[in-house]
Amino acid sequence: VSLTLTYFPVRGRAEVIRVMLKDQGAEFDEKVITMEMWKESTLKASCVSNPLFGQLPIFEDGDLTLYQTNAIRRHLARKLGLYGKDQREAALIDMMDEAIQDLLNKYIKLMFEKDDSGKEGYLKALPTDLKPFEKTLSGDKGSFLVGDKISLADYALVILLIHHQVLSPPCLHAFPSLQSYLKRLCARPNLHAYFHSDDFKNRPIIPGKRT
Amino acid sequence: MHVGPYTITYFGVRGRCGAMRIMMADQGQEWKEILMDFADWTKGDLKASCVFGQLPKFEDGGLVLYQSNAILRHLGRNHDAYGKDGKEAARIDMMCDGVEDLRLKYGKMIYQEYDTGKDQYIKDLPNHLDKFEAVMAKNKTGFLVGDKPSFADYSLFEVLLNHLVLCSSCLDTSPSLKSFVEKMSARPKIKAFLGSDAYKKLPINGNGKQ
């Protein structure tokens, strides 16, 4: 069964999908849509009338077509066994993931601001947002956010932390558990290979800015 | 997996507990409400004990959860309201995420731009509702996905009820959604809950705007 991701040639919201699939060794095709193609094409219109949300990414799993990054991620997590060992863990993974999405939404808002004026305030507030994850990962059971296996939420957090280090290299200095978590996850063989690949490195975080 | 009992700790509003209350009511579930006074909240003791410093806090037996959409999903799993298979589950997730987008827009208007932005928000609303209208019309069962209510239905229902308070004619151009709201409201347990003091006494939002 073939997996296909359709997205812009950036990391953006889809990168977390790529990271999950790469780590799990799941093959997938990529259809790249440039901004010019997006504006001109009937693809955007067909997304709206399809009748979903007029946005990318689109993900195809055989004959199932999905929109909304988080719905795609959850589908893959269920398919690949990345949603905890039971219902209780699934609920805790969802909880962690929702909080990560809150921070991601703030980050995306900052990235799309026209100038750097919001950056200082953002970085001042960041430790408060990171503390719950630091706390969760500290202590003797801190391998992953929930349980003893990597999950949906871990992939979201790892890429978010990587991008925050680009934004502000010292941002994890006060968070030893997050640093060690990031180091451990990035040492996973497939992730290590992917994060060092040109494929990843040459893909901008968002269009036109900062990598 | 439902162990129970269910307990909600939250402020005295419908807010982000609106959908889960309607869902639990419809599913015949009892739950306890712990009302948090805002002045007590700002003292910080409970806040410090909440994983993300936020309410609602939800308890299912010994399991403590935060984040309203995580709670809705947990209830979805407990009460067979997450689709009959992986395909339905994925579509339900899409719908719920779409509802969340609408909630965020509504919340922004209510809390930040009510006086200046309300009229434009109501004007723009059909553009945000048309996706749900199209899905509802296509599915033909009276639910967003499959043939029984999912947590996405309860969430959509609740947000539409709030929008009808904002503007009572806002569903007039969305016949499938209008019918959906009518049918959900008529479900016996939901009807009883919506008619109860417990529901009626709580304002929708924390700033009194609606």
Image (tube, rainbow, N blue to C red):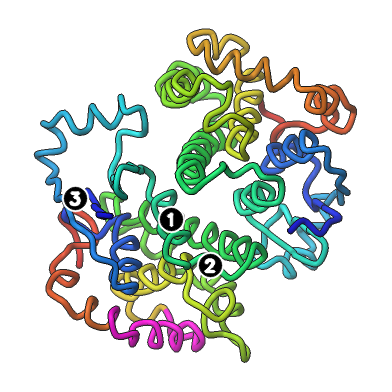
Q: Quadrant of residue B47?
A: bottom right
Looking at the image, which residue sits at the far front? A1
Q: Label 2, label 1: how many angstroms apart (C-alpha)?
A: 10 Å
| Chain ID of residue with mark 3 | A
Query: Three-letter amino acid code at disc 3?
Result: Phe
* SS at badge 1: helix
Above or below, comparing residue B41 to residue B75 in the picture: below
Residue receiving disc 2: A129
In the picture, the disc for residue A15 is none
Mark 3 vs 2, N-terminal side: 3
Circle 2/circle 1 CB separation < 8 Å: yes
* SS at badge 2: helix
Above or below, comparing residue A189 to residue A74 in the picture: below
For image coordinates 44% across by 21% down, the residue present is: B138
Is the same chain shared between marks 2 and 1? yes
In the picture, the disc for residue A8 is 3
Residues drawn in magenta = A172-191
For image coordinates 61% across by 79% down, the residue present is: A135
Observer-nearest residue: B195 or A116? B195
Q: Label 3, label 2: how many angstroms apart (C-alpha)?
A: 28 Å
Looking at the figure, which quarter contains the C terminus of chain A?
bottom left
Query: Three-letter amino acid code at disc 2?
Result: Asp
Eye-nearest disc, 3 or 2: 3
Mark 2 vs 1, N-terminal side: 1
* SS at badge 3: loop
Observer-nearest residue: A66 or B66? A66
